[in-house]
Image (cartoon, rainbow, N blue to C red):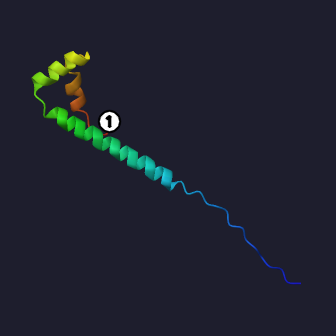
Amino acid sequence: MQSILTFKFRKFHWPAPRALTRLRRWKKRLATRHSQRREFGAASPEWLARMERDIGLEPGDLQRELNKPFWEE
């Protein structure tokens, strides 16, 4: 009697697609922060002071935000 070996292949769930999606989202968030800080950095100090007053921030809050590296929230 001859036996035939059969194999059932299990579906392998590779975690990389989720990791790549997270990496893409993170990269997009970094690029957005970088561009926003660059745009605010080009603004005049008077404009920044007026914006801080309009949104109710303490004086210097926007300048501190502009000086942060783009990877910090």
Residue located 23% across and 27% down the image: 64
Q: How many marks?
A: 1
- Is residue 70 visible in the rendered structure shown here? no
What's the residue at 85%, 83% (across, down)? 2
Q: Is residue 2 left or right of residue 11?
A: right
The residue singled out by tag 1 in the image is 72
Quarter-of-image position of residue 70: top left
Task: Classify residue 25 as left or right of residue 10.
Answer: left
Residue 17 in sight from this viewpoint: yes
Residue 44: where, in percent of width, then height? 10, 28
- Residue farthest along the front direction in this orientation: 54
Front residue (pair 68, 34)? 34
Q: Nearer the viewer, residue 68 or 25?
A: 25
> In the rendered view, would you say 3 is above or below 38?
below
Residue placed farthest to the right in the image?
1
Q: Secondary structure at mark 1?
A: loop
1 w.r.t. 22: above or below:
below
| x, y percent for residue 32 | 29, 40
The amino acid at mark 1 is Glu
Estimate the x, y position of residue 23 in percent, counting from the top left.
Answer: 41, 49
Which quarter of the rendered picture does the N terminus lie within? bottom right
Residue that appears at 61% across and 60% down = 12
Name the residue: 38% across, 44% down: 26
Q: Looking at the figure, which quarter contains the C terminus?
A: top left
Residue 62 pos. (x, y %): 22, 25
Image quadrant of residue 25?
top left
Instruction: Categorize mark 1 by other alpha carbons within 10 Å: few (<14), some (14-19), many (20+).
Output: few
